[in-house]
Structures are given as C-alpha cells and as structure tokens.
Amino acid sequence: MEKRIITISREFGSGGHLIGKRLASRLDIPYYDKSILDRIAEESGYSREMMEEDEKKAKNSFLYSLTTAFGSTGNGPDYLSINEKFFLAQFDYITKLAKEGPFVIVGRCADYVLREVPGVINVFVYADKQEKFRRIVNEYGLSREDAEKGLADIDKARANYYKYHTGQEWGRPVNYHLAFDSGYMNIEGCVDLIMRYVELKNK
Amino acid sequence: MEKRIITISREFGSGGHLIGKRLASRLDIPYYDKSILDRIAEESGYSREMMEEDEKKAKNSFLYSLTTAFGSTGNGPDYLSINEKFFLAQFDYITKLAKEGPFVIVGRCADYVLREVPGVINVFVYADKQEKFRRIVNEYGLSREDAEKGLADIDKARANYYKYHTGQEWGRPVNYHLAFDSGYMNIEGCVDLIMRYVELKNK
C-alpha cells in the first residue's frame, strides 16, 4: 500500500502509543514520539531536561499562558517565551522530517504542525474510561492508583498543551481523518483499521 | 460477520445516507431513516406532515425551545410540547425496532436513543467543505446554489435538533465508536471501513 505520514493523537490508556509503534513497524517506516526531544536538543542546543520540564509545567498549569508570557532565555527573539521557543524548535524539526519521507508520529501536536502538508493522515484514538483503565492496568502494567491518577490528569494536560499551541480543541473530529474507540479491540486490530483507511483514501 | 445495530450520523454531503443504505444491503439487514416517520404516524395517529413540519421549524429556529414550550396538542401529557411528543413517539418506535434485531439507521438521534442498548455501533461521517460540495453537486445532483445553501444550513439544523433533544454536542467523538472523513473515498470504501471496524470490535 501507499506509504504516508500518519499522525496519531490519543487519549491516555487508549493504546495509541502501541498502535503507532506497531503501525510504523508493519509499514516499515520510521516511528517518532516524545523521544524526538533528544534530537531536537542536540540540534538546537536546548537542554532536553529543560524542554521536558517546561512542557510538563505548561501542560499542568492553567496559569501557563501567564507564566510563559514573561519567560525568556535570551536565545532567539525576546518576545518569545521559553515554551514557545521549544515548541517552535519542535515544529521546525517535524516539518523537516516531513520532507524526508513517510513516518508515524504519536502526539507532539503533529496533526497541527503538518496541517499544510498534502497527504498526511491524522488519526485520533480514544476509549471509554472503563476500557482505558483496564488497558492501563493490564497492558501498561500501572497500579490501579496510578491508572486513576493518569486518567484524571494526563488528557487534561494534553488538551491544555494542544489548545495553547494550536488554538484549537483537542479531539474534535474535524481535525482528524479517522477517529475511533479502541475499546474491546486489540492493537493489531487497531492497526488493521488504520491501514484499511489509508488504503481506501486515494488522495 | 456478526450483525449489529449500526447508527450513522453524518454531515450533509458526506455520503452518509448512501453509505447507510449500502451497508444495510451488504449486511442484509433493514435500513431506516427519516422515512420511519410514516410508520410512526400510522401507529401514533400523529400526522406525518405535521411531524415533519414541526421538526423542520424546530431545527431551524433558535427560538425553538421557547416556541415549543408553549405548544400542546392536548394529546398526551399537557406539559409536553408538540415536538417533544413527536420525538418521544420516535424514541419509542426506534427502541421497539432495536428489540427486533439488527439494522442500520441514519440520523434520528438514534445513537442517543439507543445509548443503553448493548452492542450498538455509532458512526459519524464527515468531510471537508470542498469535498462535500463536490459530492452534493456530482453525486446528489443538486445545483451549485442549492449545494451552497445546504452546506450553510443543514448541519446547523441537525446540530440544533440533536442538542435540543439530547443535551449534547453533535459530532463529538465520544458519542461515536468510529468517525471518519469520507472525502476522496467512494461509498463502497466507506462501507468496507465500517464493516472492518465492526468485525474487529468483538464486544
């Protein structure tokens, strides 16, 4: 089948991460996720720890837009906050990857970053709370307590981050080509579904 | 494959109606849409014309909730507006159908009506404006002017109607198991995708 750039956004516990990895492996194309921060750090000179720490803060604070508005590293234009600089470095890096060929990327607002690139397929994976809880405990191996906490916090953080950098609501179908409830499906089944969609969409 | 009740909600021009018909035919199960109003009229004694007229008014007026609040046919509890009575008759009819076996239904807030029925699969079909316009003109055979008008009005009306009767936002993924952009796909392809999803989801 035709190989494309596929972005995957996912609710915590929906299996999106595993789906992305497996999809890339079956298509024999590169897989990217948060780990690209390492390469961005190397190329940009920013510290990976600082990027990650700042991103975490940003995601979890509703004061995000206030605190970042006053931050500046002195590296790059002064009016850009630290977090915006990190996001821009990530933006440039993902845009550069897109020029090199097809890949699968999970998270990183990649659907937004690549919105002008023709042929990109954007996927959103979600599930009901009960099914996500089951997957987090049984498949990801987290404790029931951590699963509860993750379900309460992580998607809220993702939605904050997405909203801040894209100005849009996370998880609205209009931003994706395919969105599905992965509950009661195994990872291979989810990968099958995405591959079938890409195959059927002959843009 | 296992036969299930499948509800299809769709943006105007996304092909959802044709997809539903073809899906029912390929699964060899009944197909329902707005035409169930005829049977509801027969069973309930309400006039089909009146139901349809009232629904149209309801969908297109932001004063809906005000005007319906004061209407009463004297048929059924007094505190129910005309439109609510029609909706309830439809609700009962669709609930009764669900006891008889699998089918495909397009529109009618059926995802909401059947939300407590186990095993129902809810699908939402959408597309970008350009692709919907192309489909409306080339496949539905409407004039360019009617297509423009339909695109501007019909989905707004559907969202109003859905919001009024269900209290929820139309088109939010959380209300559907599968949502996809049908642009650049033919009807058979869309049907394939839905069948594949149902097959993979072994609830």
Image: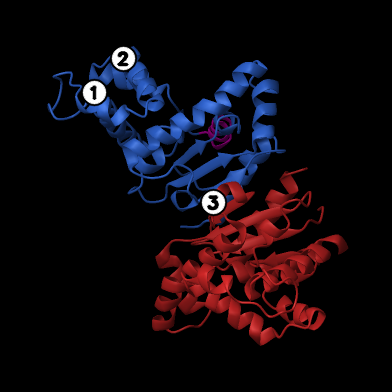
Chain colours: A red, B blue
Q: Which residues are magenta?
A: B20-28
Measuring 69% from the left and 33% from the top, which residue is drawn there?
A: B130
Residue hosting label 2: B50
Of B160 and A27, which appears nearest the observer?
B160
Q: Amino acid at mark 2?
A: Met
Of A10 and A117, which appears nearest the observer?
A117
Q: Is residue A4 visible?
A: yes
Asked if labels 2 and 1 touch by Cβ distance under 8 angstroms, the answer is yes
Q: Amino acid at mark 3?
A: Arg
Of A118 and A194, which appears nearest the observer?
A118
User: What's the CA distance linking mark 3 and mark 1?
Assistant: 33 Å
Q: Where is residue B5 drawn, in percent x and y?
A: 44, 42
The chain containing the residue under callout 3 comes to A
Residue hosting label 1: B82
* Element carrying mark 2: helix
Measuring 76% from the left and 58% from the top, which residue is drawn there?
A: A5
Q: Circle 1: is it few (<14), some (14-19), or many (20+) Cα within 10 Å?
A: many
User: What's the CA distance linking mark 2 and mark 3?
Assistant: 35 Å
Q: In this picture, is B144 found above or below A145?
A: above
Q: In this picture, is B116 found above or below B185?
A: below
User: Does the magenta segment cover residue B23?
Assistant: yes
B103 relative position to B76: left or right: right
